[in-house]
């Protein structure tokens, strides 16, 4: 019997609880954009898994109607890789912040990029640790005064865009959460891309980072597409990604095709998702394994 396709709206991806973010937090724009993006692409909630680590922004899966996992600090990409390997037909979206993803989880960021695991990673980059009330993060600007750096940060911030490109990510973009329409479009492009897609989103922490606030970004952001940027040109992409002055670029910096982890791995390539294959164990053997692991 033919079924009638029902078009879902962004509201259908609203979670059971409402965000407890501070009023004005940039993360509201990211949640809104994500809901618009998946509704626009025609997804159903059961087709998506949202995975996060720890932090204000990592609470996002709780506010989003899909399968969700709120995992350990910095380990969201590792958990998401496992889920994707078990069922590579699932659309796996990873959400979190700059401290979680580039600091505590920095090693996973590197290795997920080089493996080109087919995940969409949305990083709400507010250049500070918000949940723990305002300490310096891996993307805080040099000289920034925070609770943990009262005399100014002496550490060079990492650049997520150049890092992702150099480590082998195959879709690398940046957005500003105040431009929800542009962000939703970038998320859709990231989801449609086959391979590791990262969207680094300037998502202001209006409570603890009073420098990089909405006014700061509104005055500076400029879209790469308006300047005719060539997304195949990694060198120019890196040069443009390093600008952080009067002009800060958003948009797709770099994109290329390369085999994903599940395409490159013969066990996963042949035979379909592990989750739908025969286990190869009888019930007694399976129960013994479960008992040993519990
Ligand atoms: Fe957002 Fe900052 Fe408030 Fe956390 S502390 S919810 S990042 S504004």
Image: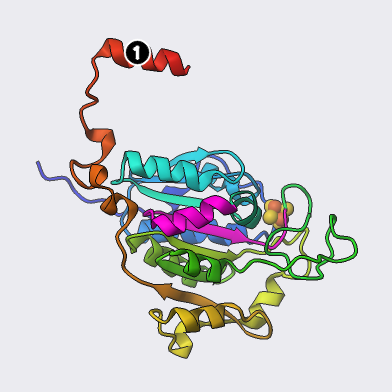
| Residue at 49% from the left image edge and 80% from the top image edge | 237
Q: Place residue 267 in its image quadrant.
A: top left
* Outermost residue to the left: 1
Residue 121 visible somewhere in the drawing: yes
**Magenta residues?**
106-129
Q: Nearer the viewer, residue 140 or 93?
A: 140
Relative to residue 66, is residue 221 drawn left or right? Answer: right
| Residue at 63% from the left image edge and 57% from the top image edge | 98
SS assignment at label 1: helix
Relative to residue 233, is residue 220 drawn left or right? Answer: right
Q: Where residue 183 sits: x, y (%)?
A: 49, 68
In this rendering, is residue 90 above or below 134?
above
Q: Nearer the viewer, residue 78 or 10?
A: 78
* Outermost residue to the right: 151
Instruction: Please tell me in which quarter of the rendered image ligand 1 is found.
Output: bottom right
Q: Nearer the viewer, residue 273 or 185?
A: 273
In this rendering, is residue 128 above or below 144?
above
Relative to residue 17, is residue 265 drawn left or right? Answer: left
- For residue 165: magenta? no
Q: Where residue 62 sits: x, y (%)?
A: 54, 42
Residue 22 visible somewhere in the drawing: no
* Outermost residue to the top: 284
Number of numbered tags placed on the structure image? 1
Which residue position is annotated with label 1? 287
Q: Place residue 220 in its image quadrant.
A: bottom right
Q: Where residue 210 sits: x, y (%)?
A: 78, 66
* Mark 1 neighbour density, 10 Å: few (under 14) some (14–19) many (20 or more): few
| Residue at 61% from the left image edge and 47% from the top image edge | 19
- For residue 116: magenta? yes
| Residue at 55% from the left image edge and 48% from the top image edge | 60
């Amino acid at each position: 019997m033919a079924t009638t396709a029902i078009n879902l709206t962004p509201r259908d991806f609203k979670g059971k609880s409402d965000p407890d973010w501070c009023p004005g937090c940039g993360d509201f724009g990211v949640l809104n954009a994500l809901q618009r993006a998946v509704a626009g692409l025609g997804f159903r909630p059961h087709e998506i898994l949202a995975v996060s680590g720890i932090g204000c922004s990592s609470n996002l899966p709780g506010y989003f109607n899909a399968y969700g996992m709120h995992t350990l600090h910095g380990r969201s990409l590792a958990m998401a890789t496992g889920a994707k390997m078990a069922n590579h037909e699932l659309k796996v979206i990873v959400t979190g912040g700059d401290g979680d993803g580039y600091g505590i989880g920095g090693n996973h960021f590197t290795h997920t990029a080089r493996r080109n695991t087919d995940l969409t990673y949305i990083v709400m980059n507010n250049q500070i640790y918000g949940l723990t009330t305002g300490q310096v993060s891996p993307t805080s600007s040099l000289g920034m005064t925070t609770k943990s750096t009262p005399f100014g940060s002496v550490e060079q911030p990492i650049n997520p865009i150049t890092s992702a490109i150099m480590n082998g990510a195959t879709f690398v973009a940046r957005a500003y959460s105040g431009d929800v329409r542009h962000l939703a479009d970038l998320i859709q492009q990231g989801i449609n891309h086959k391979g590791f897609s990262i969207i680094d989103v300037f998502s202001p922490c209006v409570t603890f980072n009073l420098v990089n606030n909405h006014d700061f970004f509104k005055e500076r952001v400029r879209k790469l597409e308006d300047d005719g940027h060539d997304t195949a040109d990694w060198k120019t992409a890196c040069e443009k990604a390093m600008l952080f002055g009067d002009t800060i670029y958003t948009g797709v910096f770099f994109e290329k095709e390369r085999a994903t982890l599940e395409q490159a791995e013969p066990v996963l390539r042949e035979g379909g998702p592990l989750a739908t294959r025969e286990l190869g164990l009888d019930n007694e053997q399976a129960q013994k394994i479960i008992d040993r692991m519990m």
